[in-house]
Image (cartoon, grey):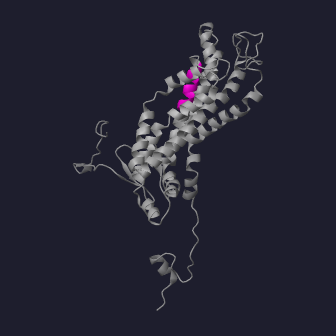
Amino acid sequence: MTIPTSSIDQVIPGQGAMAQPEAAKPGRAAKRRKFRFISNKKAMTGIVILGIYLLFAIIGPWVAPYDPDARGKQFVAPPSADHWFGTTHLGQDVFSQILVGTRAVMLVGLAAGVIATILAVLIGVTAGYLGGGWDDSLSALSNVFLVIPALPLIIIVTAAVPSGGDTLVALIIGLTSWAWGARILRAQTLSLRRRDYVEASRATGESTWRIIIFEILPNLTAIIASGFVGTVIFAVTSEITLAFIGIGSATSWNWGTILFWAQSQQALAQGAWWWFVPAGLAIAFLGTALSLINFGIDEFVSPRLRSAGKTKIKTTSGRTVRMRVGFTPVLDNSAAPHTHASPIPVIGGKPTPVTRSKEATR
């Protein structure tokens, strides 16, 4: 008796007489998974805005139309074709000051973020994985730096060493901002060091640092990136705050310096909105870009955040199901989606729909 291959395929797909093993083809889901972070609209928008700021930080002093310190004949002039963002009380071009000041802001933010992130990873992951005396000593060190006030320390040091400039500010912020991130990384490392894949690596004779670098750190990438973004935001706001209150050199241009001179010369009372609004918008857009990147990291890590707030869900068959109050869609590959709803009571032989109040559906 000969069994047709079609019958075999119906029972065990791919096991017919002429069946050949098919090479695994990467599907669309796998390709999307690789670029999920870049495809996130929030993250992509933040990266684009941040890239523009980095470009201005690099080429700003070269493409500025005027010397930011050069005095002109148009005093407190509104925006025009010659001066896009107007001029100051000395005739200085505000647009050139913003372009030149972008470099100092980005330098302090990124340098402080890198220093704090490196220290947080080294101390937090080491304390969490090694444990014992290492954990006690490094945790005590983190607790000490947690209570050090960064902003007053920066004010004291910059007042004592006025020639330090932006490099000194970035160094102080980086050295005083790593403790909180180290505590978070230590807690996550404590939960990862007893996982099966870590135990398997340890059983095969892998070295401690190889396990930390190749097994622990990849699972902490999102937390490290989020901590880096948070430190950059803190460093940027600290740099601008220090310049605004007059700490540091008043001739070293950044956005805080522009706001300092605008406030000291009563730009708001004179109605010279162009003196402080562009600098304020530059700060706001940079903070928005960094926050969007942070939101994108959170959504990349947590699947719940990726689907939160969506009223439409696409099934594997390509159909779109709209979420409604009181109905729980069952997502399958059938032609029509099924929903679970409250049973409809029958009164007088006819089904009577049940209406739910807002309080009942909560």
Using residue 27 as the reference point, say whether residue 127 is left or right of it: left
Residue 47 falls inside the magenta stretch: no
> Is 343 above or below relative to 237?
below
Closer-to-camera residue (24/19): 24
Closer-to-camera residue (120/15): 120
Q: Number of marks in the image?
A: 0
Closer-to-camera residue (261/297): 261
Q: Is residue 140 visible?
A: yes
Q: Is residue 311 visible?
A: no
Q: Majority secondary structure of the magenta segment?
A: helix
Residue 58 locus on image (x, y percent): 71, 34
Using residue 194 as the reference point, say whether residue 280 is left or right of it: right
Residue 294 locus on image (x, y percent): 52, 39
Residue 279 locus on image (x, y percent): 63, 22
**Residue at left 70%, top 19%?**
94
The residue most toward the left is 348
What is the magenta range?
233-243
Residue 72 locus on image (x, y percent): 77, 12
